[in-house]
Amino acid sequence: MSALPALAITADERHGVTIAARELASAVESATGARLGEPARTLLGDAPPPRAHLHFTDRLWGSSPEDAATLVERIAARTAFTVTLHDVPQASDGPRNQPRRADCYARIAAVARGVVVNSRHEAAHLAEAGIVPRVLGVMPLPVTPVPMTPVPAAGPGDVAVLGFFYPGKGHAEVVDALTPGARMTVLGGPSAGHEADLRAFTEQAAHRGVTVDVTGFVPGEELIARCRAVTVPVVAHRHFSASGSLATWIAAGRRPVVVEGRYTREMAELRPGTVRLVAADRLAEALAEALADPASTWLAPDAVTRPHLDDTAAAYLHWWKEEIAW
């Protein structure tokens, strides 16, 4: 197993990319019996590993896209590495940020031995940005189903969006689709720098007659229970890269209402029976129907939840062995 890379884990324990890195490292270690998980800081230490795998989003690796790219280029001068790119640049980043982020990701891809993305949708974003890795793998975010307990009694009659709050995550679209008197749960807290946006959102929702409950960050050991307690799960992002929130809903046994787009169509094809796809202009109707029939928001026994975490670990192990020229 000496040919396997060290699996770098970033420091922000609450960030979805760090969680994904930690879970993959644990699964690969279970499959191989080797200790591979390493804090990302070791890549810049006195004795860096000869091979590594990184999980990259610019916000975790630097104070700007330029700083993040420069840091990873320093790593490339010391360690051969592959990388999973998260939050892939797209037009919705805006005319100021998209070119800077695209240049950052192009610089990362240029010094990596291989690049993984979590969907064909993200691979298309790379191609649209002119980023062509030397080796590209597509490995969907895994679902890790938990043992199912009986479906809880009827929930509080709320509609819930899971994950950190930031503009574009779909919260505004959900409020617009609800009628006065409705209840919405933000199952998470504000993303860094978006505290004021969240306060403004809850005030705007109140003006529309929609009550918003913000849970704040939910620890991992409580998250599945909270996902199972809400009445209607919904995923209404305007601009997807990949969605850990969607995978978490499915892991909790839920079949969320999901706004249709290139990424969500791909996930519906990958995991039949796990989502209810709806056009954006039918979201209000779909939420009303789900509130009237909460049983429709739970997975049926024949729903396909794979790939699971062990499948993803096996896919990475095969990719490192067969596809990467270290």
Image (spheres, helix red, strand yellow):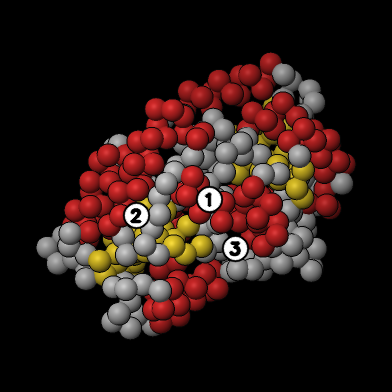
Residue type (three-letter) at the residue carrying disc 1: Ala
Task: Name the spot of residue 257 as percent of width and height, x first.
Answer: 74, 46
- Res. 8 visible in picture: no
Q: Whole-Å distance between the Cαs marked 3 and 2?
A: 26 Å
**Tag on residue 263?**
none
Q: Which residue is mark 1?
A: 124
Residue carrying label 2: 109
Q: Secondary structure at mark 1?
A: helix
Q: Is residue 272 above or below residue 276?
A: below
Q: 60 or 219, which is in the foreground? A: 60
**Residue mark closest to the camera, 3 vs 2:** 2
In the rendered image, the quadrant that contains the C terminus is: bottom left
How far apart, in angstroms, are the residues tagged by discs 3 and 1?
22 Å
Badge 2 crowding class, 10 Å Cα cut-off, few under 14, some 14 to 19, many 20 or more, is: many
Which amino acid does the dot numbered 3 rest on? Answer: Val
The quadrant of the rendering that contains the N terminus is bottom left
